[in-house]
Amino acid sequence: MALKIGADAVSVHINIGAESESQMLQDLGQVSIKCLEWGIPLLAMMYTRGEKFQEEHSVDGVKHAARIAAELGADFVKVSYTGTQESFQEVVRGCPIPVLIAGGEKTKNEREIFQIVKDSLEAGGAGVSIGRNVFQHERKKAMVKAICSMVHEDISVEEAMAVLEKK
């Protein structure tokens, strides 16, 4: 179906630790096989949610989730940011595929999300997949431009703030 509607990639959401984890992982494996057959990239959105995890952002949990995505054939993985550059570096080092961060909860201000983006990139993250911190912002296009510039041009948090403030 994805190819029929012109998709450039397929995305699967998995909650490691959830009651339905085994079914979600089976689904990921089946989708992974089809994506490989069709030559279409697969993003695994892997979150540590459920009874098995006290903390959704724990390094061990996020690292485990990212590794599962790689081992089940994902081309890249989206995970929660673990809170610090050092801890996120552990996640990246333990995963053989590109690691993206999720945008997480709505931040208090733009500087906070820009700092998270910068820290994740400096830790070796491959990019971002941010939703609410962009689409709920009053200046969506400026947020996209600032974050894209951080990812692709390695601009600083201050420079991203300047991009956002331009009229």
Image: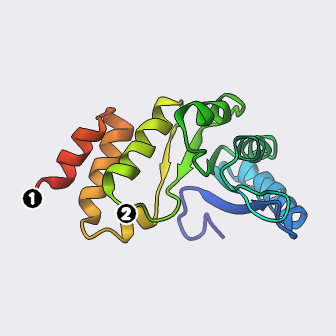
Q: Which residue is mark 2?
A: 134
Question: Which of the colour schemes (rainbow, by chain, secondary structure, one colour) is used?
Answer: rainbow
Q: Nearer the viewer, residue 96 or 65?
A: 65
- Of all residues shown, which one is farthest toward the left? 167
Query: Element type at marker 2?
Result: helix
Q: Nearer the viewer, residue 30 or 127?
A: 127
Query: Element type at marker 1?
Result: loop
Kindly indicate the quadrant of the structure image that contains residue 10: bottom right
The amino acid beneath tag 1 is Lys
Q: Measured along the vertical axis of the image, is residue 91 above or below residue 45?
A: above
The amino acid beneath tag 2 is Val
Does residue 158 appear to the left or right of 34 in the view shown? left
The number of numbered badges drawn on the structure is: 2
Q: Measured along the vertical axis of the image, is residue 164 above or below residue 86?
A: below
Q: Which residue is mark 1?
A: 167
| Residue at the (21%, 53%) spot, across then down | 164
Does residue 10 appear to the left or right of 166 in the view shown? right
In x, y percent, where is residue 150?
Answer: 34, 40
In x, y percent, where is residue 66?
Answer: 72, 44
Q: Nearer the viewer, residue 101 or 84?
A: 84
3D distance between C-alphas at marks 2 and 1 = 17 Å
